[in-house]
Amino acid sequence: MALNSLVARLPLPSRSVQKAVGIAAVVAQAGIGVTGSVVRVTGSGLGCRTWPECQPGSMVPVAHEELHAVTQWIEFGNRLLTGVVILVAAIAVLTAWRVHLATPRKRLLALAWTMPGGVVLQAVVGGMTVLAKLEWWTVAIHFLASTPLIWLAVVLLHAFTEGDETPRWLVPPIAKTFLVVLAVAMWGILVAGTTVTGAGPHGGDPETHRLDAPIELLARVHSGVLVVYLVVLAVLGLTLLRTGAPRSLWRRYGAVWLVALAQGVLGVVQYALGVPEALVSLHVLGSALVIVSTAALWCGARDRGLPPAPAVVSSTTTGHAAVTP
């Protein structure tokens, strides 16, 4: 294929470069959610009144008697950062593609393609959110759609550093079951958190509709699901203690506890102080870190072997990529 021939001309990325690209994908997918929260807490969600244009007839902010320039540029800046996420996603695909040409890595390449695919999906959902005037449930969908992308970015990072063998689980079946339950509980926390946000004071625009439900009850449900998550995490730890686990897995397990407890404390403080803007964005960052640490724990619980040694890829006279051992 012509595209294979073009990609084959790129230098083969080293293991350290591959790892750096994977880390960049995690940071990009997690970071865009945090910057989105800044848009929301500053009331800049409708700083750009339409999509994909910022204002009718203009792709960039323009002087507007009803809109402050700062709110326009905050929203427009977040849209520009999406371009950075797209760039990182493209680099991830090219890196995985080049590695795949050197030694077949179909799983790695498929994971890399989820990055630009997810960005396109998020752009569509984001456009719908703006056109729906930031209805709370559209904002919730916009946030929740980003959470699998963070998880997949962590899996992609690990895929760069491991083989494509069938996973060999390093924990017993009961521990694997608790890991599945832990992941489900994690997304339960995120879903419950969006309802608290939907009923809270930061809707992204002063005129947007809010969820008509008692925020105290929603906050209790949110914290209750967190308690379930922590209980499952504790039971998982007891299971690993009884059956044994690699030291590297224990480090990841400890990181999950650290992040989850910090996020819980931050949530309590945030609620007690009346949901100040800065703590809201920190809480969104904490949510991303909970996803990252939980996904890392999941990946660390199985072994796919070492990445295969790369072959030498060259272009033949016919213009097709040829792989030689």
Image (cartoon, rainbow, N blue to C red):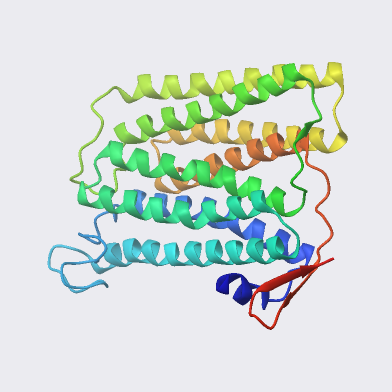
Query: In this view of the protein, which residue sits in the foreground, 196 or 155?
Result: 155
Q: Is residue 219 left or right of residue 126?
A: right
Residue that appears at 62% across and 60% down = 24
- From what the image shows, is residue 293 above or below residue 43? above
Query: In this view of the protein, which residue sits in the foreground, 83 or 93?
Result: 93
Q: Quadrant of residue 264?
A: top right
Residue that appears at 63% across and 75% down = 5
The N terminus appears in which quarter of the rendering?
bottom right
Residue that appears at 60% across and 76% down = 6
Q: Quadrant of residue 323?
A: bottom right
Q: Is residue 274 left or right of residue 211?
A: right
Q: Is residue 277 left or right of residue 5?
A: left
Q: Is residue 283 visible?
A: no
Q: Is residue 134 visible?
A: yes
- Measured from the top left, where is residue 229 in percent x and y? 59, 23
Query: In this view of the protein, which residue sits in the foreground, 196 or 192?
Result: 192
